Image (cartoon, rainbow, N blue to C red):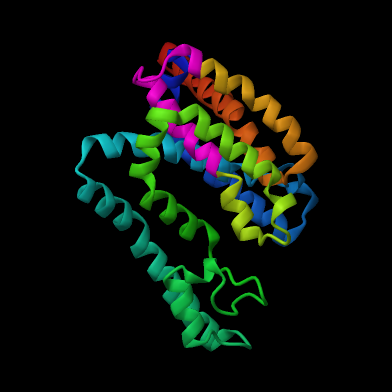
Amino acid sequence: MFSNFQLKAISNHRDAIYGISIILVILYHCYCNSKNYLLNPFAEGFIGVDIFILLSGYGLCFSYNSRTIKEFYVRRLLRILPVYFTYNILYALVACFCLKSPLSIEDFIYNITTLSYYGLGTYGEGNRCFDWFTAAILLLYLLFPLSYKMTLRRGREIFIILCLFAIFYHRIIPDVPWRIDCLVCRLPIFIFGILLYHYREEKLGFRNRRGIILFLPIFLYFGFIYSTWFFQTAMIAPFLLIIMSCFLSLIEKKLCIDV
């Protein structure tokens, strides 16, 4: 599992897999809003988020190692914040003119600064979360240099600890908001993506690679008993990533032969 061929396939088809992941998430939200029976196969389409975050950890390593730390952060922020700010402003305008309860200035500030993710404001009838993903991904980007260096030294141990925490923290911390669960359960898979890069660059040996892969089904089993769907799909994501990358490689090979 995750041989050199598979890692090369993941690198070659990263953009296509990103696209498939985004489509899965869109179809999942369509299912949630419409409950159309035709969309039932996408009831767990949020696994696209897991694949996206896994690939983000993997892809960020390339950017981090080819740029200065300043260039790395500037590039990340420019790819996210302009679109996020535009969406926030448009939503606020729509809320003011089209919705019965316009967005308050206070909530607008909390939303556009991602502070609503941390529980500030009253947006969403107590949900207090305008967009959990942007806030979460910005946090992962901010901490990425530290994550990269720590996984290079103690990657396997960090992955195991994060998995165990994601499985059992519900037993310790009651009433965890879903927006926090969304991130906590995906932290191991983000680290897993960074580890894939280290494997690709042969910075970690085969023994470490095999050890982590063997833990995936074990964590998946305990996730079904103790954790939430977010953690369970996170543990499935690496296997789905292999299937997708190999399938895309076969299609590419077939197209080349036909041409």
Identified at 47% across, 40% down, the residue is 18
Magenta-highlighted stretch: main secondary structure? helix
Quadrant of the image occupied by residue 199: top left
**Residue 86 picture quarter:** bottom left
Badge count? 0
In the shown orientation, is residue 95 left or right of residue 173?
left
Q: Which residues are magenta?
A: 187-208
Image-based side of 168 in relation to 117, left or right? right
Residue at image coords 48%, 36%: 191
Q: Quadrant of residue 103?
A: bottom right
Give the left or right position of residue 171, taking residue 62 as reference.
Answer: right
Is residue 203 toward the left or the right of residue 97 in the image? left
Quadrant that contains the N terminus = top right
Location of residue 90 in the rendering, given as x and y in whole percent from the top left corner: 45, 75
Question: Measured from the top left, where is residue 139 in percent x and y?
Answer: 43, 55
Which sits in the foreground, 98 or 145?
145
The answer to whether residue 126 is above or below residue 253 is below
Residue at the (23%, 46%) spot, across then down: 69
